Image (cartoon, grey):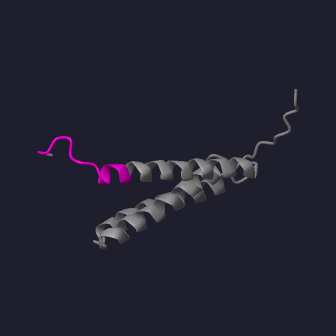
Amino acid sequence: MSEHNHEHHVSSVKQLWSVGTALFILTILTVVVSNLGLPAPFDIISALIIAFGKAYLVAAFFMGLYWDNKFNTLLLIGAFVFFIIMVTITMLDTMFRNDVVPSF
């Protein structure tokens, strides 16, 4: 059996409020950007950048990855990369497939 030598980090209230406020501001920024009427590729790109920023804040501070072993962060990034690859392959498949029901 191996010893479990892991210390838990306790975040301060000020830090949690700071991260929560940043998430709230990024949510408002998402709404503002969606109402700007940006052209097609830029609206999706800006929304994804804001979403990745929010996901980073949640994973780093609320999930504790900021203080955890960096290998766990690497595993999370690997899972996201694998997810993006699988979604891309699925989207490529649906873009070049004939319609199953022609009326759709």
**Mainly helix, strand or loop, the magenta region?**
loop
Left or right: 103, with 91 as reference point: left
Q: Identify whether 39 is placed above or below 96.
A: below
Answer whether residue 100 is magenta in the image: yes
At x 58%, y 57%, the residue is: 56
**Residue 104 at x, y = what percent?**
15, 46
Image quadrant where residue 3 sits: top right
Report the front residue among 25 and 34: 34
Report the front residue among 88 and 8: 88
Image quadrant where residue 8 sits: top right
**Residue 7 at x, y = what percent?**
81, 42
At x 61%, y 50%, the residue is: 78
At x 86%, y 38%, the residue is: 5
**Residue 90 at x, y = what percent?**
39, 48
User: How many marks do you count on the picture?
Assistant: 0
**Residue 102 at x, y = what percent?**
14, 45
Left or right: 21, with 71 as reference point: left
Answer whether residue 3 is magenta in the image: no
At x 57%, y 51%, the residue is: 58
Residue farthest along the left direction in this orientation = 103
Left or right: 64, with 83 as reference point: right
Image quadrant containing the N terminus:
top right
Residue farthest along the top direction in this orientation = 1
Q: Identify whether 32 is placed above or below 81.
A: below
Q: Which residues are magenta?
A: 92-103
Q: Identify whether 59 is placed above or below 26.
A: above
